[in-house]
Image: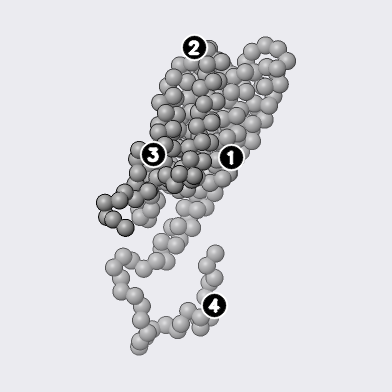
Amino acid sequence: MSTLQEAPQDRIFTVPNILSLARLLGVPLFLWLVLAEADWWALGLLVFAGLSDWLDGKLARALNQTSRLGTVLDPAADRLYILATLVGLTIRDIIPLWLVLVLVAREVSILPIAPIMRRLGYGPTLPVHFIGKAATMCLLYSFPLLLLGDHDGGAATAARVIGWAFAGWGTGLYWWAAVLYWAQTRQLVLAGRGAPPPGAPPETDGPGAGPPAGDQKGAETPR
């Protein structure tokens, strides 16, 4: 393989990354639409964001365009849309302040993971867990429904009830994902403690060397 060929994980200008960037650029516009009470335009933009979120993952796998930048842009766009929606809906008194504090506290709880990962020599983020993705989807479903529920009529009432159901599930899964991320981080920390330091010579048989791994009694089985 030619050394001039760019590694797939280092590529920047890919179709999935362009979609993620477009989703990021829509965040301030979405917040402005919510605050201006242009709810249908805001909902349309949120639908586009949700579709592009699903599409960029599909295209990244189909076109073999996964990248290191994409693993950062995708969750960043999701979190910023959630933050913008929380700010807008809280200002409009559609959701209570306590829900905002619970979701922000979850984000704060996983902030120490990034420096720990860097210290261990990994990337700054862990791979997005399925539970975390499901939580994000629940929250992104709940917010437009709660926005619709701010209007009058039977459809608005139904949207409000379903929206709060999604918000409850999303919040619970969001915190569950945080616990799983910390569990993964703990496993990496324990594995890092057991690894030999960089540059250390490999162990060889000789005087004073321990018995082979298969002959050690009481050796703990890795989990």
Residue 130 seen by the camera: yes
Give the residue at mark 2: 36
Q: Amino acid at mark 4?
A: Gly
Q: CA distance from mark 4 to mark 3?
A: 51 Å
Q: In terms of sequence position, does the residue under pointer 2 or pointer 4 come before the other? A: 2
Q: Amino acid at mark 2?
A: Ala
Q: Amino acid at mark 1?
A: Ala
Q: CA distance from mark 3 to mark 1?
A: 25 Å
Q: Nearer the viewer, mark 4 or mark 1?
A: 1
Give the residue at mark 3: 14
Give the residue at mark 1: 134
Identify which residue is drawn at 32% across, 58% down.
1
Q: Amino acid at mark 3?
A: Thr
Q: CA distance from mark 2 to mark 4?
A: 67 Å
Q: As drawn, which residue projects farthest toward the bottom? A: 207
Q: In terms of sequence position, does the residue under pointer 2 or pointer 1 come before the other? A: 2
